Amino acid sequence: MYGCKRYFDTVKIYELYSKYITREEASRILAISVPTLQNWIRANRMSETLIGDPDVEEEDAHIFDKEQLIQWRNDRFTSNEAVQALGVTKATLYRWSKKEAKTFRHYSRQSYWFLKQDVLKLKS
Protein backbone atom coordinates (compact mmCIF):
# COMPACT_ATOMS: atom_id res chain seq x y z
CA MET A 1 0.00 0.00 0.00
CA TYR A 2 1.32 3.42 -0.89
CA GLY A 3 -0.64 6.33 0.51
CA CYS A 4 -4.30 5.67 -0.24
CA LYS A 5 -3.55 3.43 -3.21
CA ARG A 6 -3.30 -0.33 -3.06
CA TYR A 7 -1.10 -2.31 -5.36
CA PHE A 8 -1.47 -6.02 -6.06
CA ASP A 9 0.96 -8.59 -7.33
CA THR A 10 0.05 -9.22 -10.97
CA VAL A 11 1.09 -12.87 -10.81
CA LYS A 12 -1.15 -13.47 -7.79
CA ILE A 13 -4.08 -11.77 -9.52
CA TYR A 14 -3.71 -14.02 -12.58
CA GLU A 15 -3.40 -17.08 -10.32
CA LEU A 16 -6.69 -16.15 -8.63
CA TYR A 17 -8.30 -15.43 -11.99
CA SER A 18 -7.30 -18.83 -13.35
CA LYS A 19 -8.37 -20.75 -10.23
CA TYR A 20 -11.75 -19.18 -9.44
CA ILE A 21 -14.74 -18.38 -11.65
CA THR A 22 -17.96 -16.41 -11.32
CA ARG A 23 -21.41 -17.94 -11.19
CA GLU A 24 -21.99 -16.86 -14.80
CA GLU A 25 -18.95 -18.87 -15.90
CA ALA A 26 -20.05 -21.76 -13.66
CA SER A 27 -23.50 -21.77 -15.23
CA ARG A 28 -21.91 -21.96 -18.71
CA ILE A 29 -19.74 -24.93 -17.68
CA LEU A 30 -22.81 -26.71 -16.29
CA ALA A 31 -25.01 -25.61 -19.21
CA ILE A 32 -27.70 -24.33 -16.86
CA SER A 33 -29.15 -20.88 -16.25
CA VAL A 34 -27.86 -18.57 -13.53
CA PRO A 35 -31.24 -18.73 -11.69
CA THR A 36 -31.01 -22.54 -11.69
CA LEU A 37 -27.49 -22.34 -10.30
CA GLN A 38 -28.74 -19.91 -7.64
CA ASN A 39 -31.41 -22.43 -6.66
CA TRP A 40 -28.77 -25.16 -6.39
CA ILE A 41 -26.62 -22.88 -4.22
CA ARG A 42 -29.57 -22.17 -1.91
CA ALA A 43 -30.32 -25.90 -1.71
CA ASN A 44 -26.66 -26.51 -0.77
CA ARG A 45 -26.06 -28.71 -3.82
CA MET A 46 -22.89 -26.89 -4.86
CA SER A 47 -21.15 -26.64 -1.48
CA GLU A 48 -18.11 -28.64 -2.59
CA THR A 49 -17.34 -26.18 -5.40
CA LEU A 50 -18.61 -22.89 -3.94
CA ILE A 51 -16.20 -20.51 -2.26
CA GLY A 52 -17.89 -18.39 0.40
CA ASP A 53 -21.29 -18.19 2.03
CA PRO A 54 -24.16 -19.80 0.08
CA ASP A 55 -26.70 -17.55 1.84
CA VAL A 56 -25.30 -14.34 0.34
CA GLU A 57 -27.64 -13.14 -2.40
CA GLU A 58 -25.51 -10.37 -3.89
CA GLU A 59 -25.07 -10.65 -7.64
CA ASP A 60 -21.30 -11.15 -7.70
CA ALA A 61 -20.90 -12.77 -4.29
CA HIS A 62 -20.53 -16.36 -5.45
CA ILE A 63 -17.30 -17.67 -6.87
CA PHE A 64 -16.41 -21.26 -7.60
CA ASP A 65 -13.26 -23.30 -7.61
CA LYS A 66 -12.92 -23.92 -11.33
CA GLU A 67 -11.09 -27.25 -11.03
CA GLN A 68 -13.59 -28.65 -8.53
CA LEU A 69 -16.55 -27.46 -10.59
CA ILE A 70 -15.20 -29.11 -13.73
CA GLN A 71 -14.61 -32.32 -11.75
CA TRP A 72 -18.15 -32.12 -10.34
CA ARG A 73 -19.51 -31.81 -13.90
CA ASN A 74 -17.29 -34.60 -15.24
CA ASP A 75 -18.58 -36.95 -12.53
CA ARG A 76 -22.18 -36.52 -13.68
CA PHE A 77 -24.47 -37.13 -16.63
CA THR A 78 -27.47 -35.03 -17.54
CA SER A 79 -30.60 -37.06 -18.23
CA ASN A 80 -29.95 -36.77 -21.97
CA GLU A 81 -26.38 -38.01 -21.57
CA ALA A 82 -27.55 -40.88 -19.36
CA VAL A 83 -30.17 -41.88 -21.93
CA GLN A 84 -27.50 -41.97 -24.64
CA ALA A 85 -25.07 -43.94 -22.47
CA LEU A 86 -27.71 -46.51 -21.56
CA GLY A 87 -29.49 -46.67 -24.90
CA VAL A 88 -32.92 -46.36 -23.29
CA THR A 89 -35.77 -43.85 -23.32
CA LYS A 90 -36.15 -41.09 -20.74
CA ALA A 91 -39.20 -42.86 -19.33
CA THR A 92 -37.14 -46.01 -18.74
CA LEU A 93 -34.33 -44.00 -17.17
CA TYR A 94 -36.71 -42.27 -14.74
CA ARG A 95 -38.41 -45.57 -13.88
CA TRP A 96 -35.02 -47.17 -13.14
CA SER A 97 -33.86 -44.15 -11.15
CA LYS A 98 -36.90 -44.37 -8.88
CA LYS A 99 -36.01 -47.98 -8.09
CA GLU A 100 -32.31 -47.25 -7.49
CA ALA A 101 -31.84 -45.53 -4.12
CA LYS A 102 -28.20 -44.72 -4.91
CA THR A 103 -29.02 -42.65 -7.99
CA PHE A 104 -28.12 -39.04 -7.35
CA ARG A 105 -30.50 -36.56 -8.91
CA HIS A 106 -30.45 -32.81 -9.00
CA TYR A 107 -33.81 -31.36 -9.73
CA SER A 108 -34.28 -28.11 -11.53
CA ARG A 109 -37.65 -27.91 -13.17
CA GLN A 110 -36.70 -30.04 -16.18
CA SER A 111 -33.18 -31.20 -15.39
CA TYR A 112 -31.98 -34.38 -13.75
CA TRP A 113 -28.34 -35.12 -13.01
CA PHE A 114 -26.99 -38.61 -12.37
CA LEU A 115 -23.66 -39.74 -11.03
CA LYS A 116 -21.81 -41.39 -13.91
CA GLN A 117 -20.80 -44.33 -11.74
CA ASP A 118 -24.46 -45.04 -10.93
CA VAL A 119 -25.46 -44.85 -14.59
CA LEU A 120 -22.64 -47.19 -15.56
CA LYS A 121 -23.79 -49.64 -12.86
CA LEU A 122 -27.27 -49.57 -14.37
CA LYS A 123 -25.74 -50.26 -17.76
CA SER A 124 -24.01 -53.40 -16.53
Image (cartoon, helix red, strand yellow):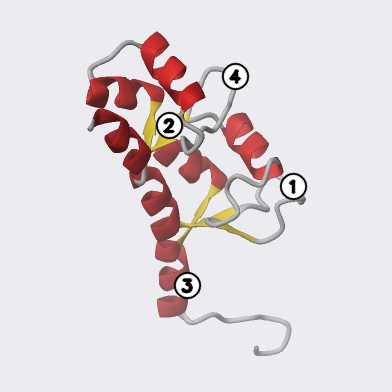
Mark 1 or mark 2, which has the lower sequence index? 2
| Residue type, mark 1 in image | Glu
As drawn, is 56 to the left or to the right of 1? right
Q: Nearer the viewer, residue 66 or 46?
A: 46
| Residue type, mark 3 in image | Ile
Disc 1 to disc 2, C-alpha distance: 22 Å
Say which of marks 3 and 1 sits in front: 1
Secondary structure under tag 1 reads loop
Q: Please tell me which residue is depicted at 45% across the width and 15% down the height of the picture.
A: 95
Disc 1 target residue: 58
| Residue type, mark 4 in image | Arg
Say which of marks 4 and 2 sits in front: 4
Q: Residue 80 location, x and y as percent?
A: 35, 21
| Residue type, mark 2 in image | Ala
Disc 4 to disc 1, C-alpha distance: 23 Å
Mark 4 or mark 1, which has the lower sequence index? 1
Disc 2 target residue: 31
Q: Is residue 115 above or below residue 85?
A: below
Q: Residue 54 location, x and y as percent?
A: 70, 52
Q: Nearer the viewer, residue 118 or 33?
A: 118
Q: Please tell me which residue is depicted at 63% across the width and 52% down the height of the picture.
A: 62
Say which of marks 4 and 1 sits in front: 4
